[in-house]
Amino acid sequence: MARYTDAVCKQCRREGQKLFLKGERCYTEKCAISRRGYAPGQHGQSRKKVSEYGLQLRAKQKTRRFYGVLESQFAKYFEMADRQAGITGENLLQILESRMDNVVYRCGFASSRKEARQLVRHGHFTLNGKKANIPSILVKASDVVAVADSSKTSEKIKAVVETNSAKPVPKWLEVNREQLTARIVELPKREDIDLDVEEHLIVELYSK
């Protein structure tokens, strides 16, 4: 399976903001943005005038990196969103939020989407009572995501859940931290998604 293997902190520096790709580390002084708040590479500190296309590209790249999906996956999700009724940009974000790894992260069962993706791949979660080890599975309203019975004694998962216990859970999710389960109340609306993305620029980019 193809995946991004370079240093993820470079992605935050390239976008000029924290994408929270490394969990708790992003809140410490070790965060790359805090130490080197400019783009990577020898021309990273030079000032550049950004074109309209450049703004659209950066919006797409930032959103893609937030969710940790590859270019081909992102293009596939855009096609899905474009075929659905409603606003394409909002449909796209809803699809990305509905990924299994993102739901695990939003529930507080992982400290980052990258960690959530790894936990899902290793078979630590179930979807509606069945093993779900594909991070890109799209959940639906009323679906139930849960930590697998064999993983409920995992000290790592327990520690992550305890650390995230004070973090708010999106209203489209209903989480039971004692049972380590979560129910998708409804698919998220645009106002439920707190990420700093400009989806209209992504639509403009793909519409060319």
Image (tube, grey):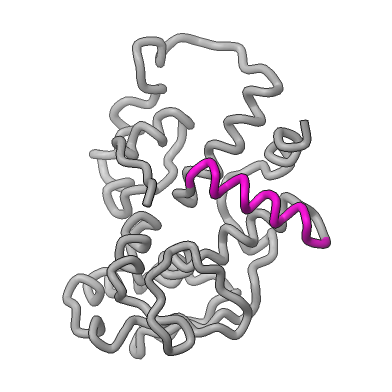
Q: Is residue 71 toward the left or the right of residue 13 in the image?
A: right
**Where does the image place residue 21, in percent across and percent down from the top left?**
37, 48
Find the residue positioned furthest to the left: 155
Find the residue positioned furthest to the right: 85
Q: Is residue 5 toward the left or the right of residue 68 in the image?
A: left
Q: Is residue 3 toward the left or the right of residue 28 in the image?
A: right
Question: Which quadrant of the view contains residue 172?
Answer: bottom right
Measuring 63% from the left and 64% from the top, which residue is drawn there? 192
In the rendered structure, does residue 73 fall within the stretch colored magenta?
Answer: yes
**Where does the image place residue 89, in percent across and percent down from the top left?**
72, 50
Asked if residue 56 is positioned above or below residue 160 in the image, the reply reads: above
Q: Nearer the viewer, residue 22 or 131?
A: 131
Asked if residue 196 is positioned above or below residue 155 in the image, the reply reads: above
Measuring 41% from the left and 76% from the top, which residue is drawn there? 132
Asked if residue 15 is positioned above or below residue 175 in the image, the reply reads: above
Q: Nearer the viewer, residue 72 or 200?
A: 72
Q: What predominant SS class does the magenta segment belong to? A: helix
